[in-house]
Amino acid sequence: MGKRAPEREGLRAVGLGLITGAADDDPSAIGTYASAGAALGPSFLWTAPVTFPMMFAVVYLSSKLGQVSGQGLFGVIRATYSRKILYAALVVVLIGNTIEAAADLGGMAAALGLLVPIPFVVGVIAIAFAIVTLQIIGSYKLIRNVFRWLALTLLAYIGAAFLAHPDWRTVISGTVIPHIRFDREFLSLLVAVIGTTLSAYLYSWQSNEEVEEKIEHGAIELEQRRGASEGELRRSRRDIWIGMAFSNIIMYFVILSTSATLYRAGENHISTAAQAAEALTPLAGRGAALLFTLGIVAVGFLAVPVMTTGAAYDVAQTLGWRHGLYAKFHQARRFYYAIIGFTVIAVALNFIGLNPMRALVWSGIVQGFSTPPLLLLIMLMTNKPSVMGDRVNGPGINVLGWFTTAATFAVTVALVVTWFL
């Protein structure tokens, strides 16, 4: 038993955090980073290292909340705050999740059309059907293991960046020297990047994933799931650090690949996923374009179920339904019907004339507006002894968490101000 423990810990270190980090680099994120790289060039690369500690803070706090309380995020909100706050948070999160899932399905279908000559409508429906089938038929363990492998497809973006042959002097400059503008274009992209890197759906998913892990190991009742040792939290911090580092590296190389090609060639406005990949072909070669396209399609199969399942978790916990991927369909019908319902809505949104890549960027902005209030609730709850017992936040994570919350509020307010000036 003792010899297997390090192996199990190692597997976890490339497990839950990696899945969450990869889900953060969903097609919406890839579209937002590509748009930023094309519009602003290498001067925007500094946002990757700056957002890394912020990503770590919010996902770790969500993980800690789930481990210590034994409940998902909205279960804790329901037990802690009034119904007004609960329902307001739910509405904001559901809007963000559904729009982003819709944008991701559209982005995947558009990218898939570059690889296989199928109509956009057929692509959206086929992808959605495959995703829902996995969610309903697959066990939590199967879904987790499939997600781990899908996460590795994001490494394609590192290859795409090197095939683009960037100017490394401007890359280094753009990475270490922040370039900030106070115009609408810059602030819109900054809010979209913050919104998509700190997306609200990640908080719900991470907290519920921790609960699912405990249930898989036999902690069925809430009282059995409450509490976490310092060792468990330490392993969680390592796990999430690895996952967020992976996510942030991918973000960096997506911006790098498009800034080294599209921005340099004057292709500053990306309107579709297909256009982004096609524009890369003459500039960086067929290999870079193919890697870029495969990344969009593959990671979408990971990210969309995280969003739709996360939305179903939130509704089920708010309304007191039985829920969880560990349960069979007949044991938690309303939970699985919610997954199907959010997927159907996301599919339908693609048939009202949304531009896929523009929708990807706007979904990031929507997430940018929904993130600050949810972060505020998480910070308040993880500092409540009634919720966390003796596992309330220490000074270090508190400073980082409150800084992240203030930064998201500040950037969102700055964007609103530009709309009126």
Image (cartoon, rainbow, N blue to C red):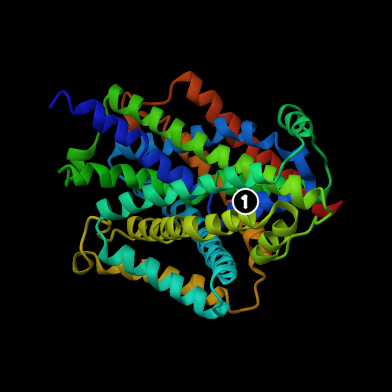
Which residue sits furthest left? 1
Left or right of 382 on screen, residue 252:
right
Q: Identify the residue under disc 1.
A: 369
| Residue appearing at x 45%, y 57% in the figure | 307
Left or right of 179 on screen, residue 357:
left
Quarter of the rendering containing residue 182: top right
| Figure quadrant of the N terminus | top left
Which residue sits furthest top? 395
Q: Residues within 10 Å of mark 1 (few under 14, many from 20)?
A: many
Residue 285 location (% of width, % of height):
68, 54
Q: Does dot 1 land on a helix, a strand or a loop?
A: helix
| Residue appearing at x 55%, y 24% in the figure | 399
Q: Is residue 205 above or below residue 92?
A: above
| Residue appearing at x 50%, y 59% in the figure | 97
Q: Is residue 302 above or below residue 47?
A: below
Residue sitting nearer the eye, 157 or 142: 157
The answer to whether residue 77 shows anywhere in this view is no
| Residue appearing at x 17%, y 24% in the figure | 3
Residue 89 location (% of width, % of height):
49, 53
Residue 241 location (% of width, % of height):
46, 31
Residue sitting nearer the eye, 93 or 324: 324
Which residue sits furthest right? 421
**Amino acid type at mark 1:** Phe
